Amino acid sequence: MTQTQPNVVKLLKPFGIDETIVSIKNFGNGHINDTLKVETVNNCYILQRINHLIFTDVDKLQHNIEIVTSHIRQKLEETGEKDIMRKVLIFLPTNQGKTYYFDGENYWRVCYFIDNSCSYDEITPSLSYEAGKAFGKFQKLLSDIPDGTLTETIPNFHNMEFRLKQFYEALQNGQPNRIEEVKDLIDAIEQRASHYCLQEKLYREGKLIKRINHCDTKVNNILFDSQTNEVLCVIDLDTVMPGFVLSDFGDFIRTAGNTGAEDDPNLDRVGINLNIVKAYAKGYMEEAHSFLTDTERDLLPYGAALLTYMQTVRFLTDYLNGDTYYKIQYPTHNLVRTKAQFKLLQSIETHLEDIASFINA
Ligand code: ADP
Ligand code: GN1
Ligand code: MG
């Protein structure tokens, strides 16, 4: 945890849990929330502290998640799914009827730990294929949620024009020494700015629609059966919101299709891993071909570059602002992340035709 260890017994009470606790473990390595696995004599739970500086309207956030999980549950019931407890997250209500609890300082939520499940931080082509199917199916399951039902839990989250506006504000108000230090990166971002605002332009022209996306398509946001490796469910639902379809293709390529790490200090290790991209494209298209428009499909390779460009801009903006958003482990962490994302972007930009061939295979 980033804070002192919470009083887990006290936090579980409002959710109606007063079983004896057997163990408490830190879980996950996200940049935003804090996750604990809590085992009691009868059950196992995930307890999460919601970062309310980032998700500023926790009530709306949890409302979105409740709609998404019940929609998926209903779809699974309709198809006669037997193992529903393991195929969609179940959040526990408090005695106030909310799926979160405010302790006066922090917001907390609890869901059941899915038995015999695991997640992976390392990728392989076969996991990538499964992930493509899982995220494609996730978008498909949610594609009939009526417009206006879900809110943007972080307004303009994957809006490139908005991210560039934040970047330009950081150039005005950020730390002067840092701005000076990264002049070349700033130039590279500015040169590409209009190219990477195509989605917003097409949307205004009525040529691109919005749909529900996961918006954080990392392989560790999928739970697999720890024995059979079958996909169980998609998790980490905070950023499920309306937006453009490229998010869920592009962000997976950005996170999994990198031969190096997101914060790799050795840029020689960073580049696009085409085997991973090929496998993801295959799995994703198997599910998504039924709902993608021609425009969306044609834009998928561009989406891989766009999401990587967006993350470059977001990491650099945070660096210029003095590291107020992402958790960092050392002072130049956001700069190292920016350089690695930019290297990945350059690599993706030279392989757009390969990516298109995988999508159209
Ligand atoms: P974050 O990415 O913000 O740390 P996640 O919700 O993705 O938070 O959870 C972190 C990790 O905890 C996941 O990658 C997964 O391994 C595990 N996890 C989360 N929820 C569950 C669950 N209900 N059952 C089993 N494992 C879970
Ligand atoms: C954050 O929670 P985590 O670490 O999966 C961020 C994503 C970024 C990512 C960088 C709410 O995700 O948008 O892509 O870090 N989530 C939020 O890897 O900003
Ligand atoms: Mg996660």
Image (tube, grey):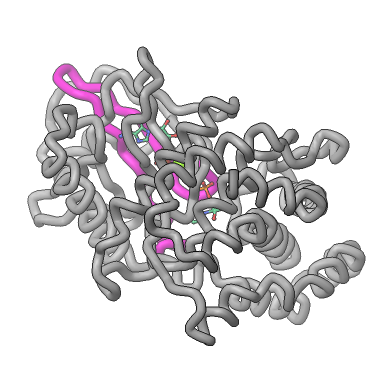
Query: 166 above or below 229?
Result: below
Name the outermost residue toward the front.
Answer: 361
x and y percent of residue 237 in the render?
A: 36, 50
Q: Is residue 70 left or right of residue 317?
A: left
x and y percent of residue 182 in the render?
A: 87, 63
**Residue 188 lies in what quarter of the image?**
bottom right
Residue extent of the magenta highlight: 30-55
Q: Residue at x 54, y 68 (%)?
A: 295
Q: Residue at x 33, y 70 (%)?
A: 151
Q: Is residue 326 left or right of residue 156?
A: right
Name the outermost residue toward the top.
Answer: 227
Q: Residue at x 51, y 65 (%)?
A: 294
- Is residue 104 in view from this perspective? no
Q: Residue at x 64, y 47 (%)?
A: 254
Frontmost residue, 5 versus 312: 312
Image label count: 0
* Residue 214 shown in magenta: no
Query: 18 above or below 236?
Result: above
Query: 153 above or below 92?
Result: below
**Residue 86 lies in what quarter of the image?**
top left
x and y percent of residue 279 in the render?
A: 58, 34
The quadrant in which the C terminus is found is top right
x and y percent of residue 187 in the render?
A: 87, 71
* Residue 40 shown in magenta: yes
- Is residue 25 in view from this perspective? yes
Q: Is residue 26 left or right of residue 140?
A: right
Frontmost residue, 324 versus 214: 214
Q: Is residue 55 left or right of residue 338?
A: left
Frontmost residue, 160 versus 134: 134
